[in-house]
Image (tube, rainbow, N blue to C red):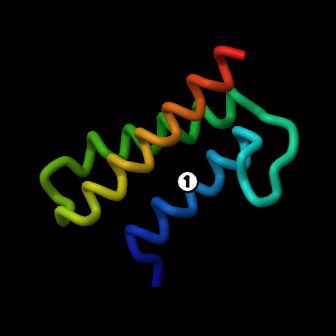
Amino acid sequence: PMAFDIFVLSLNASALMHLGDGIEAGEPNLPLARQTIDILAMIEEKTGGNLSGEEERLVHQILFDLRMRYARKVAR
């Protein structure tokens, strides 16, 4: 069965791959990275108040990291 944290971590891995920062990093695909970040942001918004403290921190920390990485890629 899929656990929420595993689902969020899989989206994180996908976004990192699209940013060119994952384990199997290739050429960055910033539109797909942005889309995955937006999906995580939507999940954060729609699940507000329904997650455990640990789940909320996980989503928040991953979003912060991905947004910073994305901003650095776009600024280049």
Residue 71 placement (x, y as % from top left): 56, 23
Q: Residue at x 55, y 55 (%)?
A: 11
Q: Quadrant of the C terminus?
A: top right
Q: Outermost residue, left direction?
A: 49
Q: Is residue 49 left or right of residue 10?
A: left
Q: Residues within 10 Å of mark 1 (few under 14, many from 20)?
A: many
Look at 40% across and 68% down and name the residue there. 5
**Image location (x, y in percent) of residue 55:** 28, 63
- In this picture, residue 45 sits left or right of residue 36: left
Up/down of 51 relative to 18, above or below: below
Q: Is residue 33 above or below residue 47?
A: above
Question: Residue at horizontal 81%, vertical 50%?
Answer: 25
Determine the residue located farthest toward the bottom in the rendered image: 1
- Where residue 22 appears, x then y in whole percent? 72, 53
> Which residue is rendered at x = 62% and y = 57% of the image?
13
Q: What residue type is disc 1 on?
A: Asn
Element type at mark 1: helix
Residue picked out by circle 1: 12
Q: Measuring from the top left, give residue 53's x and y in whole percent.
A: 18, 62
Residue that extends furthest to the right in the rendered view of this protein: 26
Horizontally, is 67 left or right of 53 in the view?
right
